[in-house]
Amino acid sequence: EISGGVVKIGVLTDLSATYSDIAGEGAAVAAQMAVDEFGGKVAGAPIEIVVADHQNKADIAANKAREWGDTEGVDAFAELVTTSVAMAVFEVAKQQNKLALVSGAASSPLTNDACIPTGLHWTYNTRALAVGTGSAIVKEGGDSWYFLTADYAFGEALQNDVSKVVEAAGGKVVGAAKHPFPASDFSSFILQAQASGAKIIGLANAGADTVNAIKAAHEFGVVAAGQKIAGLLVFLPNVKSIGQEVAQGLQMTVSFYWDMDDETRAWSQKFYEKTGKMPTGVQAGTYSSVLHYLKAIEATGSDDTDTVLAKMREMPVQDMFAKNGVLRTDGRMVHDMYLAEVKAPSESTGEWDILKILRTIPGEEAFGPLSESTCPTK
Amino acid sequence: MSDKGQYILQTQGLTKEFKGFTAVDDVNLNVKRHQIHALIGPNGAGKTTVFNLLTKFLQPTRGKITFNGRDITSAKSAEIARMGVIRSFQISAVFPHMTARENVRVALQRELGTSFHFWRSVKTLNALNARAEELLTSVGLERFADVVVADMSYGRKRALEIATTLAMEPELMLLDEPTQGMGREDVELITQLIRKVSAGRTILMVEHNLGVVSTLCDTITVLQRGAILTEGDYATVSADPRVKEAYMGKAA
Amino acid sequence: MTDLLGFPPQVLFGQLLLGLINGAFYAVLSLGLAVIFGLLNIVNFAHGALYMLGAFATLGLTKWLGIGYWGALIFAPIIVGIFGIVLERLLLRRLAGVDHLYGLLLTFGLALVIEGTFVKLFGSSGMPYSAPAELSGGVNLGFMFLPWYRGWVVVAALIACGATWFLFEKTKIGAYLRAGTENPRLLQAFGVNVPLLTTLAYGYGVALAAFAGVLAAPITQVNPLMGSNLIIVVFAVVVIGGMGSIMGAVVTGLAMGVIEGLTKVFWPEASSTVIFVVMAIVLVLRPAGLFGKTA
Amino acid sequence: MNSKIGYLIAIALLLTAPLVIYPVFLMKLLCFALFASAFNLILGYGGLLSFGHAAFFGGAAYVTGHALKVWGLPTELGILTGTAAAGILGLLIGMIAIRRQGIYFAMITLAMAQMVYFLFISAPFTGGENGLQGVPRGTALGIVDLQNDMNMYYFVLVIFGLAYFLISRTVNSPFGQVLSAIRDNEARATSLGYDVDKYKLLAFVLSSTLAGLAGSTKTVVFQLASLTDAHWHMSGEVVLMTLLGGLGTIVGPSVGAGIIIALQNYLASGPLAAWVPVVLGLIFVACVLAFRRGVVGELREFLKKSF
Amino acid sequence: MIIDAEDHQNHEIGGRHLSEHIEELRIQDLHAFYGESHALHGIDMTVYQGELVTLLGRNGSGRTTTLRAVMGLIGHRTGSIVLKGEEIIKAQPHKIAHLGVGYCPEERGIFSSLNVEENLMLPPNVAPGGMSVEEIYDMFPNLAERRKSMGTRLSGGEQQMLAMARILRTGANVLLLDEITEGLAPVINDKLGEVLIKLKERGYTIVLVEQNFRFAAPLADRHFIMDHGHIVATIHKDELESKQHVFDEYLSV
Ligand SMILES: Nc1ncnc2c1ncn2[C@@H]1O[C@H](COP(=O)(O)OP(=O)(O)OP(=O)(O)O)[C@@H](O)[C@H]1O
Ligand SMILES: Nc1ncnc2c1ncn2[C@@H]1O[C@H](COP(=O)(O)OP(=O)(O)OP(=O)(O)O)[C@@H](O)[C@H]1O
Ligand SMILES: [Mg+2]
Ligand SMILES: [Mg+2]
């Protein structure tokens, strides 16, 4: 019942460019760890992982995915960092009726307007990030916001999501500066944010932009003068590249942190041994998605997409990444998110002791109810 | 003499200033039809600059240029060329990566009016081959039609340049030191060539080789410091003590 | 106070100053490019990668050799400069006499190799580096808070620019530089050791890039790709200034920083495009650039 | 004579290739071969290095994507719209750029392309960094379903064939003659009465239009248009393809495109996956240093010497 | 017909017997190549200190190539070139220049990005005793007048003067001059002739490549006739009449 006698999972990720740290080889390793937990075999058939670099280019990703599906019998695509890649692969997955297990891409539309029946969005999305960070901060009194927004669709989506949350929680948005993407210097924008008098400077950007903005804010004494920075899409490697000294106190919403409980620590330790780094949420999420996929195959004895998908929805997602996660019909995997804060260097006991978890955000709250989803096929 | 008048080319008060330096100073040049007219003068007198002004490689500061009675002061280089005023350059001007035939054909093809036609085969230009070869023959290059020009000797390149220029059927040819850098033999060859092609055309040339000037030219204008010093036939000009002093030295 | 063009004057002053600071980076980087273009006639596409190497060298020196920021300020440009010299001797040298487009293409390839290797070695998200303790903090200028470090950047950049300008415009080297670009063989026949001159000029230009990298390390993220987009902007600066013109590179660098800074206030989205717009306009009006010699 | 046989063999190979090789890969190859050939028109035959051809490739890709997805135009018309848009963009950029030569030309085209790129990032119709996804392939002539890869392949092959013919014709046309004369000696061409700028501009517009055709076709094949298409790395890549294959040769750019695309494709999932940029960079370096004439040029030289 | 240079061992130049003279430049079996084309086919010639010799021949006979080979400007060359007692066949051009050689190239090589004065001052001094700038401006008043002009804005002839002038400044006492009268007005040629005589008096060694035989004949001690990359004849100034047939054959004067 296993097509081609082998279960093949294609990990399409960024191995050589900007996102190679948050996803990249680590994601491939994480997927392999899921396979290893099955002893390399599921429902009597061997499992194979193939990995390709999409260089953050949608066309390369689409091309590779299509080729894998057409000629190599790949059954599911995994990881898919950055939204344009995920969307491109969605097209292929839809045509070929294959599963797309998205972990790295962040945009909420993947389970809304752009959703496909076989596209599963596993790790997080912009809404969850917005809710986590936005509402938590407003609750703590950060009720006036100024955004530094990357001038492109993702930045805008993030800003909109957060604005909604902030306003719903009783805060207000006093302004926003759109900065070009990528921008090398943030001092001007920081100065504008400073002049706005807002309590919170929300960074609706990602990667190097976020890092540079935070560094500039620190340099210009923004935090010292009483304003707070809210990074909306920050990953562990970003924090490391800012340095704890500068980043301390930064609040962020994460889907995963290695040091949450024994299970995560044990898994992360294994991951660390293989890669020399602690896992990011994207990598852990890749593991979780592949593991759940394999569990469903094991349970059904089939790798037929519709059968497996039905089973995946039926079973709760239960592993070190997600406790009682639920896979919704719009493709959203609903699980708890966490509000975390960067520790001061003095609190930190080791190189990777970076975050402390402040609050658990229940899945429903983070991702919203299914009724809110605009996915036409939900 | 045609109704276009006695003079094919005239300038009135032609002046070119470079940042406070006057290279050409109020020059009134009158070139008679069907003559070989020489422009001589000491180095830096402004001869090449006059050529550049006539062909609009430089814009005159002041003055007027008329060609066949028509004011061409504000025409562009390529336009002037199309009117029939073709120049040669001090260094040989050929298309080195093309064959001799192609060099001539490039000049001929303009009149076909298909030079912008990128959808047409190059074979349509073969109709011009006969004329091209005729021109090559006229300068003694018939055996070199298929040779890539980069491989030809200097003298032959000069000859080819003249063939190409002739292909344009110029009414007026401007030659800037056509014999510069040539061995005696080639000087002789070019001199004869110029004489041959001068039939039915007008030639204005700059030349330092007084031998060439004295044998070829009907009228000689002497420039000095941008202005006309004197004008006349070789005998008159070379007898002028000012010309001797400023230009000819012991040669005269 | 009354607003200027709808913005409080202190905001404008602040932005002007910040623009000047960014301009200082542009100036140092484009200066290096101008020197290299001046003597080697090569558009050094690897300049961004070498700038990045400067920042990484700073990091490495601190981490492994315990040499601090001030030491790195001297040693990082030297190390990277030597690397540049090796590149010139091994690779660029072989392009003497061929169309300079090949130089552009070669350095483009080198940039890919260097940046790709660094992403592989150090990851893509970069590493932290903080300003030296002596320069942490800042001063309140009334209209803005100026971090000491930023102030220092301007001073250091101006010193580097001034020294370079003196070296190339006030000594014979400048004339050799320009002559060597045009006809290196002939210059050599006059008795100038052109190969050595070329090597040193490349090394110097590269060292300038690395110097900018050191200056940038505490400000921006030290990241293997930090130079890859910056380089395009710096190209535009050099072209506006007039390729190969030392003066042009410096003045235009500073001016573009300021223009960009002001754009960030009035129309932030356009701030990364404005330089290219300026470039297009300048080239239409003055094809050889502002300070370029119209050949 | 010889080249006729060569062409026949090539045509036979192209017709049968999709039976053996994955057709989508072949289509990608054809698109880039076309892109590189179009680029070669301006570099190899016009002597002008454009470092901004991505703007035309990407611009056409977006316009075609928009035309097919939003306006719902038929496929052929969508491609034509994109191609025409690239041509117009080429005209605008060309008018500014062709006034300069050499390095300046390269830099100006780069800068103009960069402006276009920033426009694409923030313009509403490009979908920002997500790009235009799910562009319908539609049908050819209203009957042939292009969703089928085989049909699509032959559709692309026809486009490629026509464009390729046009390019080789352009090179060997009266216009091509003037163009090479201009490249050889611009002042002399002027003095023969040619308005060199007009010729260069036409060459530039032709080149950008055909680059646009490549971009449009690519959008239909992959059903997406993204920022990658317009990024300056794309401009660099097309230079690499042309150089690697052989500047100023008719088949060179296609060969170069084939090598690069195949490399990218096969390296992407092999052990060297993470090293793709480095490998490309090394090829660049090797190409510039060791075989400047490119694969086809070196081969021709080799044949010339040995026979 | 080949006339051996050794036949004239006994001629005198500058009042002294040739064999007493120091060899300034000695070229033996020199071959030079442009890529694959073989331009010089084994040249042998010796120039003595204080002597002015010419290289005569048709276009393309290899005269320029000979000068370029001595200067080290040709990639591939074999044989032996001894300058002031030093073997320089493998030396780099800048090393050769510092032995006291000045080169005035055929294409003039004026630097367009430098002005006249900068062009003039550009070549480093290679030996003491060069002419002063005033002397040079005196000699070429055109240059004095245009001293702030950019190099290639000069007229053809002015560029020629500048190319000659700039090597007189450096103190080089072996001059390799390629067609220096090209494009110059006759009066300037007269003046250049005087300059060369003056330089000879100062003991300079000069190799002159000329088309203009009328200019060269009264100045030169000996003439080397070149054809197809060979030296086919050497003619002493005293033999001009008797060897007229050689000139006729190779130069068609
Ligand atoms: N573009 C320019 N800018 C400044 N000065 C110039 C320019 N072109 C020419 N000149 C000057 O104008 C004068 C005349 O130059 P031109 O080239 O016309 O002389 P010419 O008569 O042709 O001399 P030659 O016989 O030496 O070629 C010269 O002194 C020259 O330096
Ligand atoms: N750069 C070059 N590349 C290839 N061949 C060359 C080159 N320069 C000269 N030659 C060839 O070498 C031979 C000798 O040329 P050379 O320039 O030495 O002649 P010349 O006697 O100085 O003649 P001219 O009067 O033309 O200056 C000629 O056949 C010429 O074609
Ligand atoms: Mg002149
Ligand atoms: Mg010569």
Image (cartoon, coloured by chain):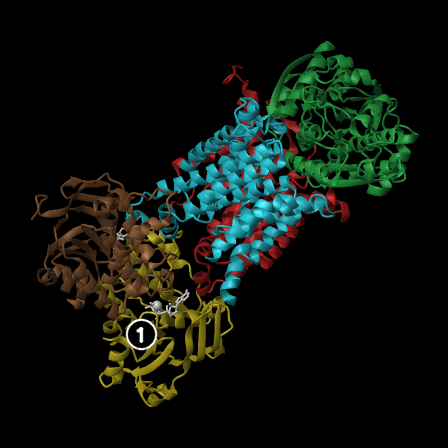
Chain colours: A green, B brown, C red, D cyan, E yellow
Image quadrant occupied by the N terminus of chain D: bottom left
Inspect this view and state whether residue D80 appears: yes
Q: Is residue D118 left or right of residue A286?
A: left
Nearest the eye: B236 or D142: D142
Mark 1 packing: few (<14 Cα in 10 Å), some, or many (20+)?
many
Q: Is residue C170 left or right of residue A312?
A: left
What x and y, as percent, mark residue D192?
28, 49
State whether label 1 is within 8 Å of ligand 2.
yes
Amino acid, disc 1: Gly
Nearest the eye: A355 or E58: E58
Circle 1: element type = strand
Inspect this view and state whether residue C208 appears: no
Mark 1, residue position: E57
The quarter of the picture where residue C182 lies is bottom left
The quarter of the picture where residue E182 lies is bottom left
Mark 1 falls within which chain?
E
Residue at the extreme right: A262
Nearest the eye: D283 or B179: D283
What x and y, as percent, mark residue A313?
83, 22
What x and y, as percent, mark residue E44?
41, 81
**Residue D238 against residue C173 in the figure, above or below:** above
**Residue A227 against residue B118 in the figure, above or below:** above
Residue at the extreme front: D143
Query: Which residue occupies 62% across, 19% down?
Result: A176
Q: Total number of numbered labels? A: 1
Nearest the eye: A102 or B93: A102
What x and y, as percent, mark residue B27?
17, 47
